[in-house]
Image (spheres, helix red, strand yellow):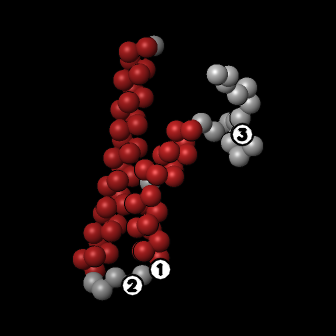
Amino acid sequence: MTLPLSLPPFMNPFVGPGTYLIFGIVLLPVYLMLAAWVLGRPSDAKRVALGVGYLVGLTTTLWGSLFVATMVIDVVFF
């Protein structure tokens, strides 16, 4: 069995497979929520607040956990 020495033509050499995984699959619910938010019409302010809160909470959790992971890596390895 031989391994390919070059990337397929549809792959960008500067972007790893994890980037496609995160932005394509993991964030799919966020994309759907944003599309529904723009295209749909919420019936009341409670639903608007729930959607905005979900978006802000998810974004804060993602960025916060990445920051904590970066600080742990910094302390452990450097």
Q: Residue at x 42, y 29 (%)?
A: 70
Residue corresponding to mark 2: 41
Residue corresponding to mark 1: 39
Q: Residue at x 35, y 53 (%)?
A: 58
Q: Quadrant of residue 74?
A: top left
* Vertical order, 47 against 19 (above or below): below
Q: Nearer the viewer, mark 2 or mark 3?
A: 3
Circles 1 and 2: CB atoms closer than 8 Å: no
Q: Is label 3 in a helix, a strand or a loop? A: loop
Q: Residue furthest front?
A: 1
Mark earlier in primary sequence (2, 3): 3
In this view of the protein, which residue sits in the foreground, 29 or 71? 29
In this view of the protein, which residue sits in the foreground, 36 or 61? 36
Q: Residue at x 68, y 22 (%)?
A: 2
Residue corresponding to mark 3: 8
Q: Indicate the amino acid at tag 3.
A: Pro
**Residue 12: x and y, percent?**
70, 41
Q: How many marks?
A: 3
Q: Indicate the amino acid at tag 1.
A: Leu
Q: Indicate the amino acid at tag 2.
A: Arg
User: How far, Cα to Cα, is label 2 from label 3?
Assistant: 42 Å
Q: Residue at x 39, y 52 (%)?
A: 59
